[in-house]
Amino acid sequence: MADLSFLDREIAGLKEQGLFNTIRTIGTAQDAWIEVDGKKVLNMCANNYLGFANHPELKKAAQEAIEMYGVGPAAVRSIAGTMSLHNELEEKLAKFKNVEAAISFQSGFSANTATIPTLMTAEDVIFSDELNHASIIDACRLTKAKTVRFKHCDADSLEERLKEFAVARRKLVVTDGVFSMDGDIAPLPELVEVASRYDAMVMVDDAHGEGVMGNGGRGIVDHFGLHGQVDIEIGTLSKAFGAVGGYVSGKQKIVDFLRQRARPFLFSSAATPADVAACIKAVDILTESGSLVEKLWDNSRYFQDKLKALGFDLGVTVTPITPVMIGDSNKAQAFSHSLFENGIFGMAISFPTVPKGKDRIRVMNSATHSKEDLDFAAGVFEQVGKEVGIIA
Ligand SMILES: *Cc1c(COP(=O)(O)O)cnc(C)c1O
């Protein structure tokens, strides 16, 4: 038997540094109010931006899909055939995003690991924002291509790097659209402009932009009016879309090639009929009306204004993601704990998800909250902020 005592030491180390994460148990559906460890609390940490995770129309679509198609896809699509549902989702997503084509995956994480290693090989160079999501970092690690990082949201730094590696065969610039821990957004017009001068492909991971940014939630490319100029958009169906899954959208050729060669497509089963049908309904609802997206933004502005007026530091956010900066892991944990005691579910985020010293409570606004919910939350933040010594 191998000696596993190193794990005792690792776990003890995490506990000493205030980095040991105790995962709470949710006893209800995802909504504005949920039951966590048996206590009813206001939910301020889900990515359920639009309330689709427990939306009656999505649930009905999922139930009908189970009746018609059963609960599982029973194989990978390239071997045993694809259900018409998956094709329908891809067609609707491509239309919604105003791109040539889309291909769905089991998650946003697998969409990234499907795309980057399929396009990039040993003779190629990937240019990656230094704060990109872990799934992009891992996708880069799965290639033999060289990966170089450019400074966060800095097109000049990207250009320096592109100059340095100008001889690379293929070049890929990759960035998050919305950065999930700070809520800032990539300077996409500048990145696209620089990339085009160096003949580099551009890929944007829009996991926190789908359903949030752009006209009716069409994402960050739509927000900047860059249709046709971004080669690849990665999307997740697990955040604003409320279910689980991921997709890649963009140029037809890229999607065609991924269908032939992307390993998570070839070697992992497709999403379930219920998930896919729920996502189709989400796209239908968003295609019809932007009212949920408007409510999300309305709520976000309202709550962020309140927190700022109380003296909280919200960092650099320009989206509904609201980091309440604390700066110390033990204080952040104490803050989160006290929020919970007072009826709010808001999680502390620490290293390695954010850099050391950048500990925070990450508040997620959503269209499910009422103004009364937000007033209640602001009151509790004020009380806890004073208690922990974050505001005066
Ligand atoms: C959440 C997230 C993902 C992963 O999406 P899943 O569908 O949860 O796997 C990928 N990229 C970014 C930028 C994300 O924020």
Image: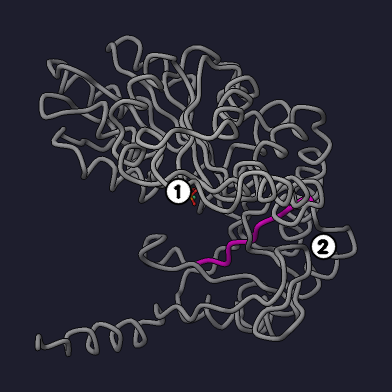
* Residue identifier under label 2: 374
Q: Which residue is mark 1?
A: 74
Region of the chain picked out in magenta, as a range: 360-367
In the image, is 118 to the left or to the right of 246?
left
Where disc 1 sits, the SS reads loop
Q: Amino acid at mark 2?
A: Leu
Q: Nearer the viewer, residue 333 or 256?
A: 256
Between the residue at mark 2 and the residue at mark 1, the CA separation in whole angstroms equals 44 Å
Residue 186 screen position, x and y as percent: 48, 33
Left or right, 225 with reference to 304: left
Q: Nearer the viewer, mark 2 or mark 1?
A: 1
Position above or below: 168 against 152: above
Residue drawn at the location 37% of the way across and 39% of the way down: 112
- Closest to the observer, 21 or 279: 279
Give residue 93's position: percent from left, percent from top: 60, 27
Q: Position of residue 348 (x, y in %)?
A: 53, 71
- Three-letter amino acid code at the position of disc 1: Ala
362 in magenta:
yes
Quadrant of residue 196 within the rendered picture: top left
| Up/down of 258 relative to 392, above or below | above
